[in-house]
Structures are given as structure tokens and as C-alpha cells.
Amino acid sequence: MYGKPGNPNPFIPAAPMHVNHVYSTIVIPHIHPVHGVTLNHQRIIHEHYFPHQFSTVQMPPVHSFRQARREGPWNSF
């Protein structure tokens, strides 16, 4: 079927080649020196408080008529 008739070495096609890849892991350390600095900060929050009290003042009643003028050093004009 292959080659010339009567050829003592007939042509034989090559068998398909299957390649098996095998991997191994090799760790190569690469040292990169780094220097770190820690900076401590303080945040100041000012809180303002205004404590207060309530008091009640009883006001004198208001009259619709004019009262007599009192004399004194505060009223000397």
C-alpha cells in the first residue's frame, strides 16, 4: 500500500507524539528591605457646654392708669 511494490523497507508513517509537560515549583526569595515609621497623631475636639438655669420672676400687674411720679435722685429732671 505504501511505497513501491517489492520494496523491502515500506514507508511507515510516524506515530503521533504526545508531549507531557511536568512543572515543579521553585521558590527564590527576593528580599526588599523596607523601613516603616509610625506617626502618632492626636485629634482634639473642643466641646462647648453652656449650663444654665431657669428662674421665674413674678412681674407686677400692669395698670391702665398712670401712677403718681415718685421723687428721688434717679428721677430729678
Image (cartoon, rainbow, N blue to C red):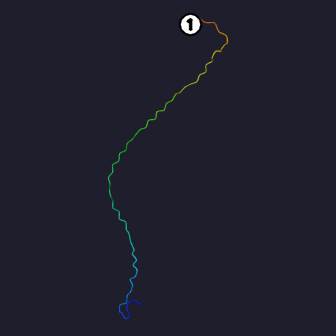
Horizontal side of 74 relative to 37 (left or right) equals right
- Give coordinates of residue 25: x percent, y percent: 37, 66
**Amino acid type assigned to the residue bearing label 1 in the image:** Asn
Q: Which sits in the foreground, 4 or 21?
A: 4
Place residue 17 in its image quadrant: bottom left
Q: Position of residue 71 (x, y in %)?
A: 58, 5
| Residue at 56% across, 7% down | 75
**Residue 51, percent from left and from top:** 53, 27
Residue 49 % position (x, y) = 51, 29
Decide which of 15, 60 is in the foreground and name it.
15
Residue designated by label 1: 75
Q: Nearer the viewer, residue 8 or 22?
A: 8
Which image quarter holds the C terminus? Answer: top right
State the SS at label 1.
helix
* The N terminus - image quarter: bottom left
Position of residue 36 relative to residue 27, above or below, is above
Classify 74 as above or below 53.
Answer: above
Is residue 71 left or right of 48 when viewed as pictured? Answer: right
Number of labels in the image equals 1
Tell me where residue 19 sits by quadrant. bottom left
